Image (cartoon, helix red, strand yellow):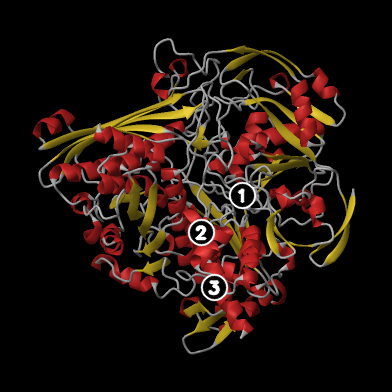
Amino acid sequence: MNKAHKTDRSDKNTSSQTNKTEQAKAFRVVGHSVPKIDALGMACGLEQYVADHDLTDALVGYIVPSPHAHARIRAIDAKKARAIPGVHAVLTHEDLPRNFHTTAGQGFVEPSPYDSLVLDSKVRFVGDKVALIAAETRELCIEAARALKVDYEVLAPVLDAKKAMEKGAPVIHDEPEAHMPIPVPYDAKRNMAASASMGVGDMDEVKKSSHLWLTRDFSTHYAQHCPIEPHVCLGYLDPRDRVVLVSSTQVPFHARRITAQALGIPVKRVRVIKPRIGGGFGAKQEVMIEQVVAALVLATRRKVLLLLTRAEEFVSRTRHPIDVTLEGGFNRDGSINGMRMKVLSNTGAYGSHALTVMCNCGSKVLPLYRMSTVAFDAKAVYTNLPVGGAYRGYGATQAAFAMEVFMDEVAEELGLDPIELRRRNHIKPGEGSPVFAALGEGKPGVEQKIGSSGLAECLTLGEKEIGWWDKRGKKLGDGPKRRGVGMCALMQGSSIPEIDMASVSMKMNDDGSFNLIVGATDLGTGSDTVLAQMAAEVLGLSTDDILVTSSDTDLTPFDVGAYASSTTYLSGEAVRRAALDVAAQVKKVAAEMLETSAEGITLVGGKACVADGRAVTLGQIGLRTLYERDQHQIAATASAISQKSPPPFSAHFAEVEVDTETGFVRVVKYVAAIDCGTAINPKLAEGQVEGAVVNGLSYALTEEYLFDDKGKMRNPNFTDYKIWSTTDMPEYKTIMVPTYEETGPFGAKSVSEICINGPCPAISNAIYDAVGVRLRDTPFTPERVLAALRAAKA
Amino acid sequence: MEFQTTINGESHLIECEPGDTLYRVLRAGGYASVKQGCDCEGTCGACTVLLDGEAILSCITPAPRAAGREVTTVEALGHPSKPHVLQQSFVAAGAVQCGYCTPGMILAAKSLLDRERSPSDAQIADALSGNLCRCTGYVKIIDAVRDAAATLREEAK
């Protein structure tokens, strides 16, 4: 029955890591698919999301959207709007402090330009914020927005990233205060939001000496994360006049800091609570509506709920559309002499994540292949289009598309099998890359050597599963429908090294259970569960003995939040340390009770045991320490900073059928083989792979922003912007290839982002195998494929 | 206007305005499992409830259509101490990530399993095709419904 969708967990491994992966099998809780701790409550409809909180007497918040892509507000008159009964606040730029900040939701100091205000006297894209309203209903908000008199000086927009830096182009950020808070290139007068470059070796020499020199241009398109729950924030004043924000955020601590910064209020006056949230995928790293809600709460002293509509969500934050040019020199045997990547990123109206997404194009893609000469040259430009931001894959999606199609072309030019070309060149354990040290997040990166890699096995198992040798180059199919297979190799990272920090607290209860209090942010990924499993593993408990409280800036210790594929790797390490600390305290008490030494005690099955068979339960220890003798609270707080960002690796294989008469591409089968180190919870890890792959498939084939000639998105709804549903699914298989990452907790690396990068290149390469046309621009809609087929014929 | 309806087994007298949707009535009544993700255009499926056992999109259903009929939300299927087979199978299969689409998915699946004891994967996919999920990639959701069907057949023996 269960044939179409299945998962293999490979037991094979490279010899150097075999012992460690064998050891990993001895874990009792880690490595097991325990149920996600909040799943049953969700399935019963009981878990609370932001909009499920008590909304009695709550006002509705509303952002008046700009109708223009680029305009100056000469005058704004809110008198009539404010006079409407039921309208409690209408705020314009004249009512709010001019505190420049970035909405990027990154650590302090952010590597994104301070080019944003809660409200400005200029609007920079269709949908930008003109004014804020709080009223008793949304209808009243809209009525008030209509009553707002705005005198716009409409300016010429920049709608083409390639023309953004041309001489005489309209300047989007002409306000003198816009600046980069860290010392990196920034030139708002030329619409340049970021630039970065690096180079090692002599590329001219590579060009001269190589058997093959190839140059290709690629481009990727806008997309939205489409969490089924759009951005939503509920704010109110507590009895001590503090602003409480219950928000669908991936970064509660950054949200607290940035809200305070934007409004000029003390951090201590803000509390951010993240309840359950309906998906994020990077969109909810953006601190974009918290300051709006806080401003309305302070203006009205009322409870305010701001829930973006789907149409508003589409122009909230997006994936940066990026043009990538690759050129490189290769020897006859496929070895790489050198490669240069040029990047032009469209960051839209604000520079959120402009620098770091662009740098990730290089840092998460170029190191995949061994090369001594390498160059990277990137710019991000402002346009009057929707704002880019963090989106699962974070630049690697865009650049991996270019790199992996490029490699397919190189293989063809050299007469090599594309899998073999990867085998000959991909980075292996013990190897480094000059790119790691050169490209960081707003500063140089961190040198690292690969510790664990299962990529070789991913390639082999995927090749077999897709039936590569039976299908490649065979152009199978009937009549106008032709089949082909394509593949790609991928890497990502796990956390931002030497920048990201996570911390957790643990305390023991009188029944031997523990509270695990984490700043980490579960946005549906299951991180609360994964972290509980790690604590349970150390303490010899089961997951349901660990009670997780997460993501409340008043209650939990700090964590940077859910981004950069960091939670399992980094927050997990903090959990492991805190658990080891409380385990030592537990053992000390047990040793007193058992009149032995703490060293001889092991924690297993809810008990502290001595080799001679004597034991006390953790419940007995809990009772004793809280009530009976030498009373004290067994508790610990621990922090972790990542020193490395060990890449997970993956190989993807696609079989497609191309209808040469309609241009429609059907994915017949898709295989994702992944090495994420130890999968702490295999089912949840598979879920990350599957979710990322299907999001990637949808991005590759059906999702596309359509703009009118004034820069307005024409299709901001699920009818006209098609995200995949169940009936679009191909036959699908995940193959987990376990390795053991020494620097990660219990051998874990990351899993959440990498697999969204595969579908674009794997499908483009499969289309080429099927019908012989190269698609170097995404997405592969029937129109594009048909045009390419016709161009090839002509 | 006023009308009588049964929600999760309890009779209710509903007062609503012309143009009110069933979604709006249910949310106002505190049935928080009924979600919204598409501006009430009927394109995401998160608002799915059962009307006389049939899965419908409550956000595009005029409220009075529930007059004299039975509305079921996921809260009525089971609770954590006594979950419905589908609720259990969604948890066990790993079909729940953010959980926002889950109530709608489970109700769409229930509507299918009530009329088809042994659905094929294609039938499951068809029945859930109006329910969008951005987290799971649907693989484990299909697994969960298939597993639940098998369990229900076993229980019926």
Which residue is label 2 attached to? B138
Quadrant in which residue A247 is drawn: top right
Residue in the picture at 46% in, 80% down: A600
Give the Cα distance between marks 3 and 2: 14 Å
Looking at the image, can residue A493 be seen? Answer: no
Which residue is label 1 attached to? B44
Residue A357 coordinates in the image, percent (x, y): 42, 37
Q: Amino acid at mark 3?
A: Asp
Mark 3 or 2 closer to N-term? Answer: 2
Q: Return the chain for callout 2.
A: B
Q: Return the chain for callout 1.
A: B
Which residue is label 3 attached to? B147
**Left of B149 or right of it: where is B34?**
right
In the image, residue A333 sits, relative to residue A194, either above or below, namely below
Mark 2 or 1 closer to N-term? Answer: 1
Question: Element at badge 2?
Answer: loop
Residue in the picture at 60% in, 65% down: A37
Question: Could you classify mark 2 by the number of other residues whose Cα lies within 10 Å: few (under 14), some (14-19), or many (20 or more)?
Answer: many
Give the Cα distance between marks 2 and 1: 14 Å
In the image, residue A728 sits, relative to residue A546, either above or below, namely above
Quadrant in which residue B102 is drawn: bottom right
Mark 1 or 3 closer to N-term? Answer: 1
**Left of A526 or right of it: where is B69?**
right
Are the residues under badges 3 and 2 in a single subunit?
A: yes
- The C terminus of chain A is located in which quarter? top left
Give the Cα distance between marks 1 and 3: 24 Å
Q: Nearer the viewer, residue B99 or B109?
A: B109
In the image, residue A331 sits, relative to residue A628, either above or below, namely above
Q: Amino acid at mark 2?
A: Tyr
Looking at the image, can residue A591 be seen? Answer: yes
Q: Return the chain for callout 3.
A: B
